[in-house]
Amino acid sequence: MFNIRKTIICTLLILLLSVSVFAEDNRIVSITVKGNQRIDAAAISLVIKSKAGEPLSQEKVSQDIKEIYKLGYFEDVKVESEKSDSGIILSYLVTERPIVREIRIVGSKEIKDEKIREAIILKPNSVFSTKDLTSSEKKVKKLYTDEGYYLAEVSAKSEKRGKNELRLVFTVSEGKKILIKTIRFEGNKAFSARKLRKAMQTKEKWFLSWLTGAGAYKEEVLKNDVNLIADLYFNKGYINAKIGDPEVKLLGDKSGLDVTIRITEGEQFKNGDVDFRGELILSKEILKKLIKMKKGEIFSRAVLREDVVALTDKYTDKGYAFANVTPLSKIDPNTKTIDITFEFEKGNMVFIEKINITGNSKTRDKVIRRQFKLAEGDLYSSGALKRTKQNLTNLGYFEEVNIASAKGSADNKLNLNAEVKEKSTGKFSIGGGYSSADGPIGQASIQQDNFLGLGLKAILSGSIGGETQTYTLGLTDPYFRDTKWTLGGDIYRTEREYTDYDRRVTGADIKAGYPLTDDLNTFWLYRWESKDIFNQTEALDSVEEITQESSYTLSSIYASLSLNTTDFRLDPTKGTSTTLSVEYAGPGGNARFVRYIGESAVFFPFKWNTVFSLRGTLGYLQRTGRDIPIDENFYLGGINTIRGYGTREVSPYVATPDGVAFIGGNKEVVFNAEYVFPILKEANIKGLFFFDTGNAYAPGQQIFSTMRSSYGFGVRWYSPMGPLRLEYGIPVNPRPGIDSSSGKLEFSIGGFF
């Protein structure tokens, strides 16, 4: 028995010794990296989990291989292990991917090489990837397809240039440009093919395709057109409409592409009952007044979306930032109606915790913050937030304004993050015109609307032409000493040759303004001028009723009240703008008069981003003890009043043996109607048709007794130098011997009037 026990103990000791020896033999004594040339071994070792001194683990080694591959520099990774007396020597053998040293493009003529290189994923001195090469080939092919080269073929290959270096060659066979010749529809009854085409971004080719890009086949755009057509149907009650994927075929003669879209319309539905439920903070009667959806009208998904936004905004305006309005629909296929129930979840009231501003490298924070209609600690309001964005956009300092909300330190707190992208606020503007009487005239000015990043408006302008010289230096602070007051001033000198006399003015002004509300503003101005009238024509000298002093001084006070509800001050699309003003000239000068002017404009948005606008101006000059200086009278005509007539020549006049003398009027009336439409939306180029009518009247003449009218067309472009106007006006009722009946072309670059 003792011998058996002794034998078992000896056997166990031998087994334990063997395991210990085996563990020592399986321990990693060193790890090396081989085969790397450009990539440092230390960078590779950082991702290796196996460590010297640890037992060899097949699982860890497999993970090491994956991690080395993830670095993206190697096309092959192997592992070698070598046993030594002290343990295992572990070696990772890597094969580096080659480097792209050169990219050549062969066969490209219609698209510039620079644009092709932008589409290629691989770049010089980047690590080569077969996958990226294949993707680059597809991207270049798509680039050609988007440009209209539907038949273009692109092949890419790699060539060895040196040790572990490659040259990539993209060979292009462009073929001829193939555009979409026809867009056809099958199954459409509710809408004509013409109306469906208008809803699409993709267009058929036409004779100006070279300018507009119409006819180009772009797969993503065409797919999105399916959604646009579906929206058209959904907004007219066809809730079961189905729009098939576009089928694109190359015509047999390869002259163009044919696109076919199949449509299943279904039946038209109308609105049924409309109800509200959930956490209501307003009565159902008030909520019904906020929505456009009415029972019995044709159902529209767009109207439903607008109603959801309107109802949500009403809640968020009262501080419920996370309010949720869900429209629940109940479709009755028998009556072809849809009942809608708006379900409300108001959530908690939310307060503004912090306002963060980024992107303003030039503009001071305070210039942006003072446009905010919300302050830290205020109750959240979506309406105030929208107004803030509009205010910042109207400043004209930024290309982009984005305001996003982020969670604050508590559930009922939000941070507002305003990100702006600044643009150049310095403006160089020029303007001019040409007529057979006046010849060429021109002007230039330098203006900085955000001087020193403080929102100050500085202007240094001058104009030199055949008939005019003007110099102006001015500075205005729209928020004087961080208040709502506007304060500024100008000094100027002007010399101008008019039709019947020349005028020289040296003057200065001080101006101030204060907003009564967001839309209602007051403005005051005091101006002092020293004026000289000289070189009067013989025709004007011979007019006995004109007794014009050769020099005089003007001291006047001007006040105005303006209401502006337009969406964008620089280029309105909707809203109104009205200004009432009065100017009194009296003590401090020897000119005496009172000038009253009322101006109003209204803008109506229409389909296809078009805008119709109406403008009207009424003016009256009241004599107070002395004759009104001739240069202070009303003169109309030209690009800013009645187009097609000579500048300042729509005016009372006197015919004498020496010619015609324009003497101006003490009353004026002007009406302008414009229809503005986009020509090239991406470049912000617009066209317009207009009709102008009006006149200036002498004392004793009845206002509206005679009206001079014109019509015409033009182009407007918001260029980097400022808004450009090129307009051609044709008089409707020209005065014989005074006005040209053939029309007048005028242009200006600078602010629109």
Image: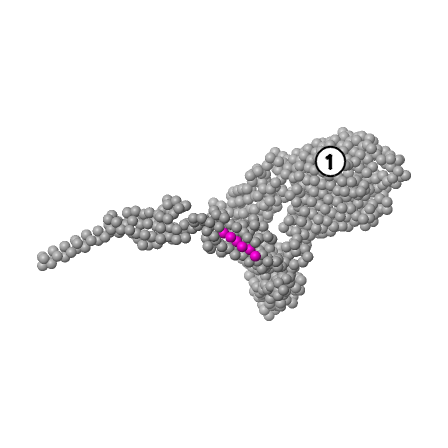
In this rendering, the answer to whether 69 lies above or below 180 is above
Disc 1 designates what residue? 464
Relative to 160, 703 lies left or right: right
Q: How many marks?
A: 1
Q: Position of residue 337 (x, y in %)?
A: 60, 66
Residue furthest to the top: 588
What residue is at 35 percent from the left and 53 percent from the top?
78
Residue furthest to the left: 2
Q: Which residues are magenta?
A: 168-173
What residue is at 69 percent from the left and 52 percent from the top?
677
**Residue 202 inside the magenta-drawn segment:** no
What residue is at 76 percent from the left and 32 percent from the top?
505
Q: Position of residue 602 (x, y in %)?
A: 71, 49
For the question of whether residue 124 can be seen, the reply is yes
Position of the N terminus, as image quadrant, is bottom left
- Residue 504 occupies quadrant: top right
In this rendering, the answer to whether 377 lies above or below 149 is above
Relative to 325, 607 lies left or right: right
Give the residue type at disc 1.
Ile
